[in-house]
Image (cartoon, rainbow, N blue to C red):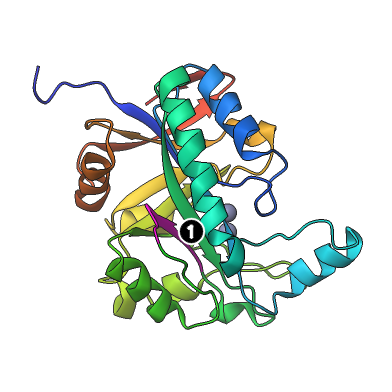
Amino acid sequence: MPGYEPFLLCDFHVHTRWSDGRLSLREVIDLYGKTRRFDVIAITDHILMERDLLARAGRLVTLGRRQFSVTEDRFHAYLEEIAAEARRARRLYDLLVIPGAEITQNHIRSKKNSHIVALNITEYVSADQPAEDILRAIRRQGALSVACHPHHRTTRRFEIGTCYLWDHRKQLVDLVDVWEAANRDDLFSVTSLKHYPYVANSDFHKPKHLYSWKTLLRCEKNWDAIARTLRSNVDVALTLYRNGSWAA
Ligand code: ZN
Ligand code: ZN
């Protein structure tokens, strides 16, 4: 019956071993798929700044074995693997997999930091440019932007806060498509109170992150319908997915 279609259970923020996730892309797909609950996930590995300090430290610790970033020269291979795994996911689990990336800025002065997920990305977007230009580059290629954990503020010295977009929301509101109102275990009440378009994601890095905030969308299971629903933010709900069950 039109208007009473079932909700899709979605997670639009998932990391794999292409950056700093614990699991391979295939392992992630199988983990979500085998729950038989999920309809849509987006693979959103980090694109870091050239001089990202945390990645440098990580490369030292792993003696260069891990990259932590989808670099420009690996971007095409990254998209190809997502496309191949997406076909397998649809066939095995009826799971729609969307190609994405998290364009990540980790400055030492965290006031300037933003983490921006681009959904349905087709072209590389550099993290070495102002957040405004990242948002414009995402929009130019017809992808959809998500301001990630926009209210994550920290007072600890070696933790990264990511409040730039939120602190400049008045200037940026027309460039940001959706705000991440909930990330893993945290709920950013300020975002939702402002009635911005919102979404909730796991920011998945390891298996236990499966149990976290998620988004429910009432629309057809294809990218055009999903993008329309996210942008208009009608028929969207946040849900906490716990131990294999969920309730809106
Ligand atoms: Zn992030
Ligand atoms: Zn992330």
Location of mark 1 (residue): 148
Q: Does the image show residue 226?
A: yes
Residue at the image position 58 percent from the left and 73 percent from the top? 105
**Residue 31 image-quadrant placement:** top right
Residue at the image position 51 percent from the left and 27 percent from the top? 241
Q: Label 1 is placed on what type of residue?
A: Cys
Looking at the image, residue 30 sits to the left or right of residue 222; the answer is right
Q: Residues within 10 Å of mark 1 (few under 14, many from 20)?
A: many
Between 228 and 238, the residue placed more toward the observer is 228
Q: Quadrant of the N terminus?
A: top left
Residue at the image position 68 percent from the left and 32 percent from the top? 208
For the record, the magenta segment spans: 115-122
| Secondary structure of residue under mark 1 | loop
**Residue 247 image-quadrant placement:** top left
Q: Is residue 189 above or below residue 208?
A: below
Residue that extends furthest to the left in the rendered view of this protein: 2
Looking at the image, residue 169 sits to the left or right of residue 18; the answer is left
Residue 181 lies, in percent from the top left, at: 42, 51
Residue 209 lies, in percent from the top left, at: 63, 36
Q: Is residue 9 above or below residue 128?
A: above
**Residue 228 located within the stretch drawn in magenta:** no
Q: Is the shortest distance between ligand 1 and the CB of mark 1 under 8 Å?
A: yes
Q: Which quadrant contains ligand 2?
A: bottom right
Residue at the image position 39 percent from the left and 80 percent from the top? 133
**Residue 120 located within the stretch drawn in magenta:** yes
Residue 79 lies, in percent from the top left, at: 49, 51
